[in-house]
Image (tube, grey):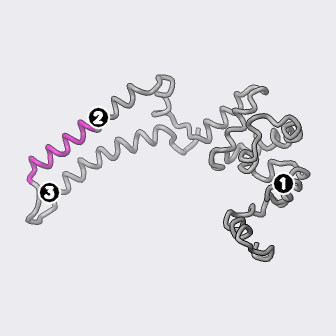
């Protein structure tokens, strides 16, 4: 299990914020001594009204989501865990689903991406280049980490799509591309 908290942490933070409003009201009622202080009855009415609104919203939300996702609000799985399990349970013919994970933030595959996705990309890249599946687009190629692409293809992309050979180097930035379009020189880059 991850210590990230997942859906449980989200649900806990909602409950904690509700409880925090009661604590704030208590501190306000007992320790705020200014002339413009709200009376206790008004403060309690506002707090109860907001609590009822919060409860109605929460119940409405839970009743409107698909039942198969209810568990995501009390389990400890993070997006990283979810994506790893997704990749492990995909069949060989579900490449598009596996490829879509590359669009997620890199942190969501931290710790397992190199183990599961890198070998898959390295082994399949030449096949994808020749078959050009619908998901194998320039946009997708741009989000793939450099070290997930075979060296020979990285050299090709360096010449044609702004990729670099060394995984430690960063890709050409948008600012540099704009400078080039506006007449900047190679030295500017």
Residue in view at x 79 percent, y 34 percent: 133
Alpha carbon separation for disc pair 2 and 1: 53 Å
Instruction: Name the mark nearer the viewer: 2 or 3.
Output: 2
Residue in view at x 69 percent, y 32 percent: 97
**Spot occupied by residue 16 in the image (x, y as percentages of width and height):** 34, 45
Side of 57 relative to 161 (left or right): left
Instruction: Name the mark nearer the viewer: 2 or 1.
Output: 1
| Circle 1 SS class | helix
* Residue located beneath label 1 in the image: 157
* Residue located beneath label 2 in the image: 55
Of residues 7 and 66, the one drawn nearer to the viewer in this rendering: 66
**Spot occupied by residue 108 in the image (x, y as percentages of width and height):** 63, 45
Quarter-wise, where is residue 84 in the image? top right
Tell me, yes or no, whether the two marked residues, 2 and 1, touch with CB atoms within 8 Å. Answer: no
Instruction: Name the mark nearer the viewer: 1 or 3.
Output: 1
Q: Residue furthest front?
A: 182
Looking at the image, is 60 positioned above or below residue 172? Answer: above
**Spot occupied by residue 79 in the image (x, y as percentages of width and height):** 58, 40
Q: Is residue 45 magenta?
A: yes
Alpha carbon separation for disc pair 1 and 3: 67 Å
* Residue located beneath label 3 in the image: 30
Magenta region: 39-53
Alpha carbon separation for disc pair 2 and 3: 26 Å
Looking at the image, is 11 positioned above or below residue 141? Answer: above
Q: How many marks?
A: 3
Quarter-wise, where is residue 159 in the image? bottom right
| Circle 3 SS class | helix
**Which numbered disc, 2 or 1, marks the residue that appears first in the sequence?**
2
Side of 42 relative to 161 (left or right): left
């Amino acid at each position: 299990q991850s210590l990230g908290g997942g859906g449980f942490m989200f649900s806990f933070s909602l409950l904690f914020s509700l409880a925090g409003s009661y604590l704030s009201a208590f501190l306000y009622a007992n320790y705020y001594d200014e002339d413009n202080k709200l009376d206790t009855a008004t403060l309690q009415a506002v707090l109860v009204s907001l609590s009822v609104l919060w409860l109605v919203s929460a119940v409405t939300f839970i009743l409107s989501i698909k039942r198969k996702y209810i568990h995501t609000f009390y389990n400890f799985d993070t997006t990283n865990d979810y994506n790893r399990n997704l990749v492990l349970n995909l069949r060989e013919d579900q490449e598009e689903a596996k490829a879509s994970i590359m669009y997620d933030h890199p942190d969501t595959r931290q710790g397992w991406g190199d183990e599961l996705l890198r070998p898959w990309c390295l082994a399949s890249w030449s096949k994808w280049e020749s078959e050009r599946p619908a998901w194998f687009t320039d946009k997708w190629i741009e989000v793939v980490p450099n070290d997930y692409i075979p060296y020979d293809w990285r050299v090709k992309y360096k010449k044609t799509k702004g990729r670099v050979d060394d995984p430690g180097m960063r890709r050409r930035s948008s600012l540099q591309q704009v400078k080039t379009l506006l007449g900047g020189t190679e030295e500017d880059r």
